[in-house]
Amino acid sequence: MAGTRQNRIVSLGLLIALLIGGLVATNSLRPTVTSETEVTGTTPIRHVVVIMKENHAFDNYFGTFPGVDGIPSAVSLPDGRGGFASPHWINTTWTPDLPHSRAAMIEAYHNGSNDLFAVVAESQARGLGNVSLGYYDRRQLGYYWSLAKNYTIADRYFHSMLGPTIPNRLFSFAGTNDGLGSNAIWLATISAPTIFGQLQSRGISWRYYYSPGPLVAPLPMYFPELASHPDMKARVVPMDDFSKDLSSGNLAQVVFVDPSEDFLISEHPPEDVGVGEAFTRAMMDAIMSSSSWSSTAIFLTWDESGGFYDHVPPPQVDSWGYGFRVPMIVVSPYARRGWVDHAVMDHTSVMRFIADNWRLPYLTSREAMAGNISSAFAFPSAALKAARVLEEFAPGTSVAGVLVLSIFSPVFGQVQLIPDVTRVPSSLRLSLEPVRRRCAR
């Protein structure tokens, strides 16, 4: 397993470097995609990029961020051992995985009390209850906090149902989970239409970039309208294609980025949050440096809360949910700066924004009732230049008290290799040099 992990670490370094440098080679086996033209929308936004990471609640990442509805003071919750515990800062950059099935989330929700997260986690393994109440802050997530400070963060954004990754991701592009309550999509009969079919029929370009993995196929492939349509299947492509498309000026009008099958970059516990943040930063920097940036809206969110505590009871709009709050950061030349959006939203809000922007009919009642995320934008004001997003710490300053157990150390202003990967051949380590140089600027 150690060798496999080291190989994945090397692969991550190569991928981040290639994202920044735009050096990914063309995949000769990629199906041919027919020519596409840009379709004008109702706003200045011509490109929507949805980056959906994995398994962190709002309070787990932004519970102490200034100006948001964060963790209340003097919270005391059952700890699963007969006592009580309070939310606390995590002094590492990773945690064990927590129970986050539909049943686990319903129990933690506790009819709206939101007080049994630790009890549920502790029932799986001793000590996990304390983990479930932990939170990170800018000491580990300096880049994400700076994005939130410079653009718009939403503090009433919920994942779409009480449950795990896959059904929540389905809501983001189908407006429904089509009855799926678990991750076992290969056992389900999926028949719902998707926004990809709508985009295809209107001639609006789209791509779904995914991290290949051994467990499931890319999620759109489970929908008959894609599986039986070669031209649509050709738009579901490996993550490596993103850099090539962006650098060649071929960023699609609607882009979904799904790293869920690669825990190392998706931030799914037990992987290091700093590694996933570095991947996100590389992608963000590449977009902001491209010719498409001036008309792009990036929606950065997390698919579900992963079993971590969040203090806000989610509205129950139907028998599935909402689920708990997850972070949502809106990054765009048109995004409101330093803005906290308090509107109630969920994953279908992004789908609705896409539909409204290109005059598409709503596919489901969930999409039609979704909170309007356009409040995060300052239309029709002139686009602002990209904010220079810097961490809250001086470059090269180590963050005291953070125990680092990953390939990247929390030295803000740069990405730094630590001894675990010094055994990687120097020729491969050099591929990370552009990342260090870029992040040190």
Image (cartoon, grey):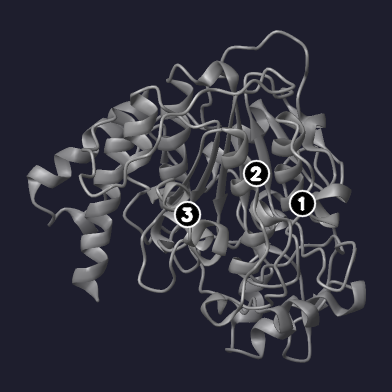
Q: Is residue 39 above or below residue 349?
A: above
Q: Tell me the quarter of the picture where residue 387 sits.
A: top right
Q: Which residue is mark 1?
A: 363
- At label 3, counting other C-alpha atoms closer than 10 Å, the crowd grade (few under 14, some 14-19, many 20 or more) is few
Residue position marked by numbered label 3 in the rendering = 229
Q: CA distance from mark 3 to mark 2?
A: 13 Å
Residue position for label 2? 198
Going by the numbered disc 1, the residue's amino acid type is: Leu
Q: Nearer the viewer, residue 216 or 270?
A: 216
Q: Earlier in the sequence, mark 1 or mark 3?
A: 3
Taking depth in this image into account, of 281 and 76 the one nearest to the observer is 281
Left or right: residue 220 compared with residue 238:
right
Residue 283 percent across, percent down from the top left: 43, 36
Amino acid under label 3?
His
Quadrant of the image for the N terminus? Answer: bottom left
Are the two marked residues, 1 and 2, in contact with CB atoms closer than 8 angstroms?
Answer: yes
Q: Earlier in the sequence, mark 1 or mark 2?
A: 2
